[in-house]
Amino acid sequence: MALSLSLAASFGFLINDFEDVPVDRVNRANRLENAGKNELRFIRQCSIGFLLAAFGSAALLGIKGSIAVGLISAGLTVYTFCVRQKLILATLLAAILSSTPLWVPNVVFGSLPSPLQMGVVVLSLILLVGREVIFDAEDIQGDSYGQRRTLATTFSRSFAVSLSLALNGTGAALLVMLLYVSKRTAPAPIFVMNTAGVLLFLWLILPPLYKVKCSPESRQHYKSFTQRSRLAMLLLPAFLLCF
């Protein structure tokens, strides 16, 4: 299931990058805006290959796996071509799609998550919404050029950064609360490991986000947050398993 979701996500990332070429030229995102015709043709073929491979691997899991991949692929396509200019809706849909590796396997295989695991899914959604909002703040120039209605372009970059800080702070507080609750049932070695993971997670996302808050015009601070938040997001599946 993880392989199928990764392949479907790769398809979504590529079609999104294709659609974002004019905007990425303004943002200087270093994605596909400098690619030649042959490179773009190859990448387009790769996107189709990823989609077919996603369906092929999901079919091995049965009809539920195929339906899940189909819905996620459709959601990624709708996000790219229909929802990108919708205020709030685009941010929420992006966060939901990004969180699918955490909860889709439970849906497919019919296992109900524990209350602590549900808490991890909820805080993950909050953190991912905050992450999308900070990306919108970084890309305000390109989004304005593309006439996209984001929180940054509709209100201000400062408003978007403050909201992202509040959302990430809320998600971090929930994570600490879940850690405290898990102390009652987790063996001592597992609790120590979870504590180390939570501290690492907080260190990865909060300091760079605070720097963005202090200097919202600095592209270097946005880049630092993006790189460190990617590492932090890799810890969420571990929390789901350990809590």
Image: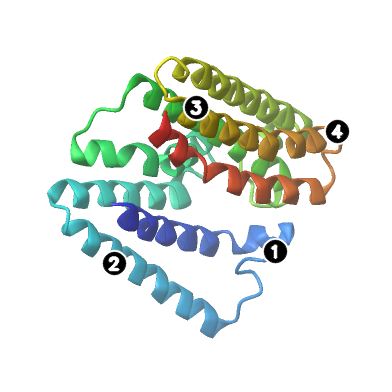
Q: Which of disc 3 and disc 2 is earlier in sequence?
A: 2
Q: CA distance from mark 4 to mark 1?
A: 26 Å
Tell me the residue at 26%/51% (across/down). 70
Three-letter amino acid code of the residue under disc 3: Phe
Contact (Cβ within 8 Å) of mark 2 with mark 4 = no
Q: Which residue is mark 2?
A: 53
Disc 2 versus disc 4: distance between alpha carbons? Answer: 44 Å
Seen as rendered, the residue at the extreme bottom is 38
Q: Which mark identifies residue 232? A: none
Q: Which residue is mark 4?
A: 214
Residue under circle 3? 191
Which is closer to the viewer, label 4 or label 3?
3
Q: Residues within 10 Å of mark 4 (few under 14, many from 20)?
A: few
Give residue 163's position: percent from left, percent from top: 68, 26
Q: Alpha-carbon distance for marks 1 and 2?
A: 30 Å
Q: Which residue is mark 1?
A: 25
Tell me which label, 3 or 1, sits earlier in the chain: 1
Residue under the image location 18 percent in, 35 percent down: 110
